[in-house]
Image: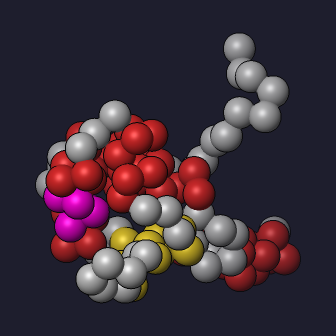
Amino acid sequence: MALRGERWAKVVESVLCDLGLSSNAVRVFCNLALWALRGDGKVSRGRRAIAAATGMSRDTVSSAIRQLKERGHIRVDGTGRARRHYFLLSPVYSEKVIEKRKKAA
């Protein structure tokens, strides 16, 4: 039974079926997908918040993010101590693609 106000996310098959990803990377992607903004797939969440939500260490989250980036599932903007922005690269997270599909149907 779902709780009222419970968050949910779309998770793309390309991530779920990517056997080159660790289960931690898939879990981190799921957490990012919860916070992706419609239209550009942008996520502005820190590693600490992701780690707390997933029960992982920040180092484990960093490793998972590196895997997701190397396998082409996300883009990471920002360096050093600045807040990083993550972009989910599947067109599923792009509002423009969703709108095109609705019009075509």
Label total for image: 0
Does residue 12 appear in this view? Answer: no
> How far from the left and from the top, in percent, is residue 35?
59, 57
The colouring scheme, among rainbow, by chain, secondary structure or one colour, is secondary structure
Which of 41/78 is in front?
78
- Residue projecting furthest to the top: 1
Q: Nearer the viewer, residue 16 or 9?
A: 9
**Which residue: 35% across, 46% down?**
51
Q: Is residue 40 magenta?
A: no
Say which residue appears at 27% left-offset and 83% top-offset: 80
User: Where is residue 93, by image quadrant?
Assistant: bottom right
Viewport quadrant of the C terminus: bottom right
Relative to 55, 85 lies left or right: right
Quadrant of the image containing the N terminus: top right
Seen at 24% across and 44% down, the residue is 57
Q: Closer to the camera, 10 or 6?
A: 6
Q: Is residue 93 shown left or right of residue 24? A: right
**Residue 69 horizontal/vertical position (percent):** 26, 72
x, y percent for residue 42: 55, 74
Q: Nearer the viewer, residue 45 or 25?
A: 45
Position in image of residue 102 (x %, y %): 81, 70
Residue drawn 53% across and 69% down? 44
Magenta span? 62-66
The outermost residue toward the front is: 81
* Helix, strand or loop for the magenta stretch, by majority: helix
